[in-house]
Amino acid sequence: MRNVLRSAVGVLALALVLPVSARAETWVIDPAHTVSGFTVRHLMISNVTGVFEVTRGTIEYRPGDPGSVKADITVEAKSVNTRIGRRDDDLRSDNFFNADKFPTLAFRSKRVQNVRAEGFDLVGDLTIRDVTREVVLKVDGPTAPIKDPQGNRRVGATASTTINRKDFGIMYNRTIEAGGVVVGDEVKINLEVEAIEKKS
């Protein structure tokens, strides 16, 4: 009987503690301090870089438990910016993102793997032009939370991956005299994310 009572007390104490320590926190991405960038080869001799200026979404995780991270991120295709207006218009056209028909690029996480001291790998589905492929984001972070001047808790993280644009139906290209192509197939993606805790 004593053992039963002792076990019951232990279970009750655990139940009182777990909801606090295991509670998942929700963080809302701050578009003003978040950039989704990309790099691609041009004419096989140099890199062109650009950003999507509007990134939104949420991140959920239990503090101290990287394996609990879940991310839901969307990027506005029309917000692409490479600093050259004519090139940006081309990227928004059907040659590339077709932003009118497919207004967003999206990433939905599925699982965490390879947890390490500085970060982890976040596996999820990336959707571009209604084509979805599994990708792996290498994440550094999240940082320890800090409070901004307004009293909001904030965290930051960096994530990167590399994709083949043709896997997502972006096939446009032109050959050059030397036998190469104008635009490379491999695209490096880098996200600099800052998020604010969603208050309950």
Image: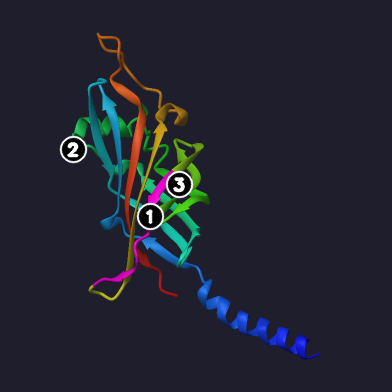
Task: State whether residue 187 is above or below residue 124.
Answer: above
The label number, if any, that marks residue 83 in the structure image: 2
Circle on res. 118:
1
- Give the foreground label among 3 and 1: 1
Image side of residue 66 versus residue 160, left or right: right
Q: CA distance from mark 3 to mark 1?
A: 22 Å
- Please tell me how crowded label 1 is: few (under 14), some (14-19), or many (20+) other residues with Cα within 10 Å: few
Does 145 lie within the magenta span? yes
Label 3: state its secondary structure. Answer: strand
Please give the name of the residue rendered at 50% of the width and 43% of the height, measured from the top-left corner: 125
Decide if residue 125 is on the left or right side of residue 88: right
Q: Amino acid at mark 2?
A: Arg
Query: Looking at the image, is 87 positioned above or below residue 12?
Result: above
Residue at the image point whose x is 62% and y is 84% from the top: 13
What whole-number distance in Å separates the C-alpha atoms at marks 2 and 3? 25 Å
Region rendered in magenta: 137-148
The residue under label 1 is which amino acid type? Glu
Sequence-first disc among 3 and 1: 3
Residue 114: x and y in percent read 49, 49
Magenta segment includes 94: no
Name which residue lies at 41% across and 29% down.
164
- Asked if labels 3 and 2 touch by Cβ distance under 8 angstroms, the answer is no
> Does the CB distance between marks 3 and 1 fall below 8 Å?
no
Secondary structure beneath dot 1 equals loop
- Which residue corresponds to mark 3? 107
